[in-house]
Structures are given as structure tokens and as C-alpha cells.
Amino acid sequence: EEAPSGSIEEGTYHTQAYVDQHVASLLRESQKKRMTMEEFKKKRAKDFEEIFGGAEDDERKMREYRKQLDAEREAKLRGGAAKKKDKKKKKKKKKKKKKSGDSSESESGSESESEDARKRKKKKKKKKAAKG
């Protein structure tokens, strides 16, 4: 005994007319010529380029970005070296002032020298405490 077409036992709930129509549409679709991926790429190359950008364009942008980063890094590195030199010059000037100032003070008395020495020691201790 065979189940009638379109019955639950057959595994489908559709009528025979629907099944025939569906099969016919599948056959029509299978007979149509489809584009290959290469053909599609050629046809849509312009759209792909707009959306995803060209490979040459990406490389060019990356090179420009690297140049910009390199220039910024160089500027920062040069700036640091210049600041160090300025700092050293200021220290040398300070030392010269102290030496020239110390020679005139030494004539005035040894008490002021020892007082200055104590002040300098206090400053050094404060700096060390602040750093540590």
C-alpha cells in the first residue's frame, strides 16, 4: 500500500500542483547561465574599488602615514636633545655665578661661607627626599 501524494507519510504537506510548479522553477533556474566569480569581479571592479579601495592606494596611504609618524618621532627626539643642552648651559651659568659670588663673599667672612654651605646641604637633602 502506497501513501497518496501530498500526504504526511510522504514527508510533504504541499499539493501535487505546487510540487510540479516548484520543480519546474528549479529546472528553469538551473538552465540559466550564471556568472563566474571572475566575470563578476570584472563587471563590478569599479564598485569593489570604491568600497574596499585599491591595493596600491592602501600601500600609498600606509607609506604616507609612516612618513608622518617618522617625522613626529624625529621632532620629539630632537626636542629632547635641545632641552638637555639648554639645561646644561643653565647649570654652567649658575655655577659660574656661584663661583664669582663665592669669591667676593670669602673676603667678607668665614661665617657666611659656612652658613651658605649649610643651606646648600639642606637643599640637597630636600631634593633627595622629594625624589625618593
Image (cartoon, rainbow, N blue to C red):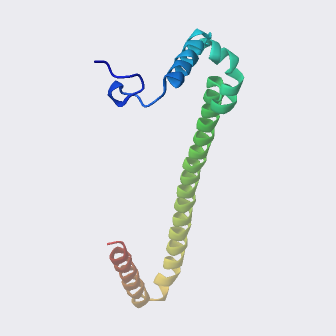
Q: Quadrant of residue 89?
A: bottom right
Front residue of this view, candidates 33 and 113: 33
Judge whether 107 appears above or below 82 on screen. below
Seen in the image, is 105 located left or right of residue 79? left
Judge whether 39 appears above or below 110 on screen. above
Which corner quadrant holds the N terminus? Answer: top left
Front residue of this view, candidates 33 and 63: 33
Q: Residue at x 40, y 90 (%)?
A: 111
Q: Position of residue 76 (x, y in %)?
A: 57, 50
Q: Residue at x 58, y 48 (%)?
A: 78
Seen in the image, is 66 located left or right of residue 106? right
Q: Residue at x 58, y 36 (%)?
A: 66
Seen in the image, is 9 located left or right of residue 34? left
Front residue of this view, candidates 121 and 61: 61
Which corner quadrant holds the C terminus? Answer: bottom left
Q: Position of residue 2 (x, y in %)?
A: 31, 18
Q: Quadrant of residue 57?
A: top right
Q: Position of residue 50 (x, y in %)?
A: 70, 30
Q: Residue furthest front?
A: 1
Figure disc tally: 0
Q: Position of residue 59 (x, y in %)?
A: 61, 27
Seen in the image, is 32 located left or right of residue 12? right
Q: Residue furthest left?
A: 1
